[in-house]
Amino acid sequence: MNYLIEALATLSANRLRTALSMAGLIVGVSAVIAIQILGHAMTGATTGIFQGFSNYTFLVYPNSRNGFNQQQAVSLAEIDRLQSISNIRLAIPYSQPTLLARAGHNTAQVSVGPTGAQPEFFSQPLAQGRLISQEEVDDGARVCVLSANGAAQLEPSGSILGATVRAGSLPCRVVGVLEKPPTGAQNFNFGSDVYLPYTTFERHFLPARKSYQILVLIADIGQIATTEDAVKSALQQLKNGKFSYQTFDNFFLAQLAARIFNGLTLVVGVIAGISLVVSGIGIMNILLVSVTERTREIGIRKAIGARRGQVLAQFFFEAAILTFAGCGLGTLVGIAIGWWINTQYIVKISGVIVPVPWLSSVVLATLFAAAITLAFGTYPAYRAAGLNPIEALRYE
Amino acid sequence: MNERDGGQRAIELREITKVYANGALRVPALHGISFVIERGEYVAIMGPSGSGKSTLMNLIGCLDSPTSGTYLLDGVDVSKLDDNALAAVRLRKMGFVFQGFNLLARTDALRNVALPLFYAGLPARQRLALAQLALEQVGLGDRSRHQPSQLSGGEQQRVAVARALINDPAVLLADEPTGNLDSKTGEEIMALFSKLHESGRTIVVVTHDEQIALNARRVIRLRDGLVVSDTICDFFALRG
């Protein structure tokens, strides 16, 4: 307690030195934290663009260099033979025609697609109503779920839930509406504006009730490659080896994106590391510049009877107070800057405020700055406290 | 000088030698110094540069240890103590006054004077109250909140004297206390020393200035690391 008071007195007596050290700490720590936050936010914003991804579906379609052959198309009965392949939860026929839809007096061009009862088939979470039930799928009921975009186009003012939408010539009742996707998020999820039970879709929108493409929902992403191979060979067998099939999934894109993000994170980390070192050198400089004065001070203190340990303790307390206050203020300033730029600018790229794991950057920056301050705040004392007081008093 | 019991002796040096080892080179500074300073004495130690005067002052001030010999300070052998024990001895038994004042910059007179009490472990309130008293004793009671840069040289040296006395030391050790002062201010400081001597303080002044030495009651002269003379110069007795 005594040391704390004495250290505070010394710090307030040497205001310029204290202010400069604190400024070094605050600038250094806040810069590092702000850079880290912005880096994470930027990475997060880029990730947000890919948020439409669902990793649980992949698409199967024929290998065809010279256009599609009618015989390559598969019927629902043929698709049902794939359901027994392990890891497959549901395989459904797929296509996505763009049709004129009508609701009351409104008309709009919308994409119409098939779905099962599983939520993974939808590109966004549900906002109103409900998803399509298994019974409705089994019965081929005339019900649909609209994307936010589809709902907005067909009913610009008010709720469309419960209304009847005529998709092409098929009237169907709207049971649910999806959430709006984040601005900038691209939909790679084979999502539609009007989702119909795939049984209904198959009956009304597939020519000859056959489709060229199959949408497959799987259970375990880790086995996606094996499942894709199994589906391809099963289809090839089904067609007596006459045709081969290929697949498209988000997993590949996701891996690509992950590599880009890792690169971004690395760059951000390096920049933050460089600013840490720069700020560390700044703090070091300020603390070492006062060595001459402080060495004389230590000489005085030792001559009047301070023990080495007492001198060191006092300098340590001074450095600790500097560290605590400087790192604390620097952290607040850094978070404020990072938060401000994040909410003002980066939000416009991704459409969402990206949650930032700022805690680790705060801990890292603070620990580093604290180590530098404690080391170089105490180092002159460590050296000088070992000197004969007379030598310390003569130190120039 | 009368041989009195050890309790009366402030300083007793027996065959003190000091050799500075600088690598393989050994530089002898003191060749065997012996003398006794009784309590309440006012002694000047004089000698030209290179006489070993500064070395002797460092030893008396417990800032350094002798190579051989025995040093009893206030009856306690301090010649073989380690750094921390010497620091404790300086804190309790020795008050320093330096040529260059050596006050802490940007720290007011009161806190400068209170500093030894901090190391002695006194609580803050008590430290400052005792420091205020000490400053009043050297005539600076109204200057306690001034920083060294706001004080004249003489005032700074008086603050240093107050700081030296705050722990009630056995010996007040001054190293050229007037070296940085003009002659008038120097006389003021020496008058303060005489007053302290009259009140019973043991004072040792290390100087090369004969005028300063005239204030002391006894002069020990060094040359080449040996005591060459030790005289009591009692002007009051001479004047009768």
Image: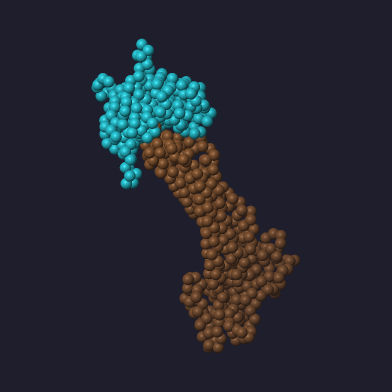
Chain colours: A brown, B cyan
Q: Position of residue B40 (x, y in %)?
A: 33, 21
Q: Quadrant of residue B34?
A: top left
Residue closer to the observer: A197 or B119: B119
Q: Position of residue A185 (x, y in %)?
A: 62, 64
Q: Position of residue B6 (x, y in %)?
A: 25, 24
Task: Check the image and name the residue furthest to the right.
Answer: A105
Q: Residue visible at 42% across and 34% down? A: A300
Which quadrant, please, contains the N terminus of chain A? top left
Task: Check the image and name the residue furthest to the top.
Answer: B240
Total marks in image? 0
Compared with B143, A159 (above or below) is below
Residue closer to the observer: A194 or A244: A244
Q: Residue visible at 61% across and 68% down? A: A187
Q: Residue visible at 51% across and 33% down? A: B106
Residue closer to the observer: A120 or B130: B130
Q: Is residue A176 at least partly visible in the picture?
A: no
Compared with A135, B168 (above or below) is above
Q: Position of residue B126 (x, y in %)?
A: 42, 26
Q: Is residue A382 at least partly visible in the picture?
A: yes
Q: Residue visible at 63% across and 72% down? A: A113
Does residue B97 appear to the left or right of A176 in the view shown?
left
Q: Quadrant of residue B15?
A: top left
Does residue A44 appear to the left or right of A288 in the view shown?
right
